[in-house]
Image (spheres, grey):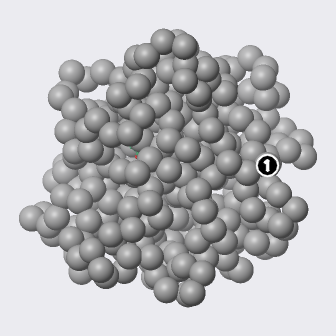
């Protein structure tokens, strides 16, 4: 995550901006919304942004979040409930700092909250907490998920009941430091630094039936171009950066993600949850603010994209979540979403 002063960010304090959607909640700052339908309602698992007084840098130190609040709504456009603190960093025994983008899943009467946080050695790991209630409070497991690393877990349950976790993010998300399989504390702050080689990939692992551990090896989520070649490191407009999501539409697997420093949401389609995924294009233009993070969910026969921007604060680390309808075309492509006009 994060370089300073990119793209449309400079424009964010200009007057006469017209937004596609309203912030879903204005009493707290929220970001990275992972939306799910549980018991006929929409539950949103977002980051809870705060101003910790830390200067902005490319490592994302200014994103110093300390707890999670879960939001719910009965219908799109209806009132949004903030269920209060669902998990506090002080109640995660192994956590150091920075509670970043979470996700959630349900199985056999239990809800699972998956979250990235730096451990006491300042290395991002992914943890899991459980509750009998989709809105929490959640109780964290005593240790991170064995074999987990980096950020942005996105948990997808397929129609056969198998559950997969997609995760990873380069730059501040530290994925590049795991290129050899072990963490390199002196590794690059950005990417692999080899522009003409295949880009770093998002990771995917199947979850065991207990939803607390990986089942087998962590694998690469390879995105290829139309000719079947993996995208390259230098291809900043198309390669994976962070913020992945998976949804299934008409039997196809849609891997969606942020291109980070080029601020786009892109999609690639595959025939199974592991990939490879063929790059198809951009489906959301940059939002206001540096980061772009989303989720996609079907609710009552329509598809929606949850995302964030910085409408309320004008500051890149104080974001607000939003939602708008998402449309698939008859050929399976996704219609472009443009979240604001000047
Ligand atoms: O909210 C902190 C980080 O910013 C997330 O983990 C990234 O996806 C980006 O949205």
The quarter of the picture where residue 72 lies is: top right
* SS type, badge 1: loop
- Which residue of the protein is positioned furthest toward the bottom in this rendering? 228
Q: Is residue 74 left or right of residue 26?
A: right
- Which residue of the protein is positioned furthest toward the left in this rendering? 186
The quarter of the picture where residue 43 lies is: top right
Instruction: Say which residue label 1 marks.
Output: 327
> Please, is residue 258 above or below residue 138 in the view?
below
* Image position, residue 237 (x, y; %): 44, 60
> Please, is residue 47 above or below residue 168 in the view?
above
Which one is nearer the viewer's eye here, 124 or 282? 282
Which one is nearer the viewer's eye here, 136 or 319? 319
Which residue corresponds to the image point at 61% horizontal and 20% vertical from the top-left? 18
Q: Quadrant of the C terminus?
A: top right
* Image position, residue 314 (x, y; %): 40, 20
Which residue corresponds to the image point at 32% horizontal and 49% vertical from the top-left? 1
Which residue corresponds to the image point at 52% horizontal and 64% vertical from the top-left? 166
* Image position, residue 206 (x, y; %): 57, 74
Q: Is residue 221 left or right of residue 98?
A: right
The quarter of the picture where residue 189 lies is: bottom left
Q: Is residue 280 left or right of residue 109?
A: left
């Amino acid at each position: 995550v994060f370089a300073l002063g990119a793209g449309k960010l400079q424009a964010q304090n200009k007057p006469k901006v017209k937004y596609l959607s309203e912030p879903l909640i204005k009493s707290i700052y929220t970001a990275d919304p992972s939306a799910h339908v549980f018991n006929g309602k929409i539950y949103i698992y977002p980051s809870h942004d705060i101003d910790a007084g830390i200067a902005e840098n490319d490592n994302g130190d200014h994103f110093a979040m300390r707890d999670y609040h879960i939001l719910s709504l009965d219908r799109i456009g209806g009132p949004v409930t903030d269920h209060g603190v669902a998990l506090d960093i002080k109640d995660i025994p192994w956590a150091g700092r920075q509670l970043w983008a979470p996700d959630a899943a349900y199985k056999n009467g239990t809800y699972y909250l998956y979250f990235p946080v730096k451990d006491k050695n300042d290395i991002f790991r992914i943890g899991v907490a459980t509750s009998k209630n989709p809105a929490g409070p959640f109780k964290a497991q005593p240790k991170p998920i064995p074999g987990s690393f980096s950020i942005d877990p996105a948990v997808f349950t397929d129609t056969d009941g198998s559950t997969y976790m997609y995760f990873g993010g380069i730059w501040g998300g530290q994925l590049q430091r795991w290129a050899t399989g072990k963490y390199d504390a002196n590794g690059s702050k950005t990417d692999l630094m080899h522009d003409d080689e295949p880009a770093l990939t998002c990771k995917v692992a199947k979850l065991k039936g207990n939803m607390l551990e990986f089942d087998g090896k962590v694998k690469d989520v390879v995105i290829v171009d139309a000719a079947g070649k993996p995208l390259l490191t230098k291809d900043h407009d198309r390669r994976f950066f962070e913020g992945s999501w998976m949804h299934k539409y008409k039997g196809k697997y849609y891997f969606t993600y942020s291109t980070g420093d080029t601020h786009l949401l892109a999609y690639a389609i595959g025939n199974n949850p592991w990939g490879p995924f063929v790059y198809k294009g951009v489906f959301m233009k940059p939002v206001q603010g540096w980061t772009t993070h989303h989720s996609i969910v079907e609710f009552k026969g329509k598809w929606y994209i949850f995302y964030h921007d910085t409408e309320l604060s004008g500051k890149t680390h104080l974001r607000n979540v939003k939602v708008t309808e998402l449309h698939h075309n008859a050929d399976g492509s996704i219609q472009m979403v443009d979240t604001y006009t000047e």
